Amino acid sequence: MVVTPSSRCCGCLSLRYGTILIGVGNCVLYGCLYIWYLTSDLLHQGGFGDGLGFNSADVSILSILTVQLLVNILLLHGARVSLPAHTLPWLGVNAVAIGLYMAVIGRSLFLGTKSLYISYTAYVGSLTMMGLVTGLSLFCFFVVFQFRQNLIWERSIQDYHSEESVQPVPLESCLPPPSYYEVESDKQYKASLEDDPPDYEAAVAALEKGVEDCLESPKFENK
């Protein structure tokens, strides 16, 4: 009995559709952020927004958004064609992002409101927002990770069944053909075992002798 892996993401979605939904949502999110960053002049004064070219902050932020867009597009393609290798870049990038989120939360908890120079309300709100983002990212990470494991498991099961269905090749078909010497020696051996046919005169003499024996037999004389 073969145990098939579970393919449920939650109560209403499978892992495949959950992964596709995660990829589509991230593509929409990072695409909107990409467009907003290029058209807004609030976050990068003195740089691209003021017509002075890209500075280091612009390049860093746009690189992060580009990488996120690429890995999410690759995730969508991998979920559509069932390729587990295409989910690996998304898992790597988001594992680094989750680690950074946790590091920021830990630093904020360690420093507190006095070191960060923010009000208590803003401090609690920022921690709550970062906690929600980290929790959602962890949930999406586990969904994609389980989807990848299921794809690998299903592929190994298919390979196992395909190996069982293949018929073994007979040993005789794998052997090379016999050599000319072996064929000729086999013919000579068979010829030596068989007797030569009798001549025509010997056959006629044997037939006449058989007829004479039949005529001289006692049963024939009584008749």
Image: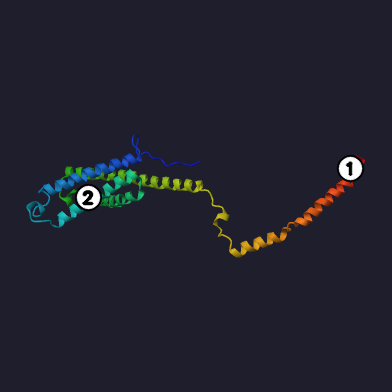
Q: Where is residue 11 shown, x and y percent of the image?
A: 35, 35
> Which class describes the residues within 10 Å of circle 1: few (<14), some (14-19), or many (20+)?
few
Residue 110 appears in the picture as rendered: no
For the rendered model, the colour scheme is rainbow
> Which class describes the residues within 10 Å of circle 2: few (<14), some (14-19), or many (20+)?
some
The answer to which of 15 and 185 lies nearer the viewer is 185
Residue at the limit of the structure toward the bottom, as seen here: 181
At 10% across and 56% down in the image, what residue appears? 53
Disc with the residue nearer the chain's start (1 vs 2): 2
At 89% across and 42% down in the image, what residue appears? 220
Report the side of 112 relative to 19 (left or right).
left
Q: Amino acid at mark 2?
A: Ser
Residue 48 appears in the picture as rendered: yes
User: What secondary structure is marked by label 2?
Assistant: helix
Report the side of 78 relative to 38 (left or right).
right
Q: Is residue 10 above or below residue 34?
A: above
Q: Where is residue 167 shown, x and y percent of the image?
A: 53, 48
Q: Amino acid at mark 1?
A: Phe
Q: Is residue 20 above or below residue 48?
A: above
- Quadrant of the drawing holding the C terminus: top right
Q: Where is residue 43 shown, x and y percent of the image?
A: 12, 50
The answer to which of 129 and 46 lies nearer the viewer is 46
Q: Where is residue 100 shown, x and y percent of the image?
A: 25, 52
At 86% across and 46% down in the image, what residue appears? 214
Residue that carries the numbered disc 2 in the rendered image? 108
Q: Quadrant of the rendered structure where residue 28 is?
A: top left
Residue that carries the numbered disc 1 in the rendered image? 220
Residue at the limit of the structure toward the top, as seen here: 12
Q: Quadrant of the rendered structure where residue 6 is?
A: top left
User: What secondary structure is marked by label 1?
Assistant: helix
Alpha carbon distance from label 1 to label 2: 131 Å
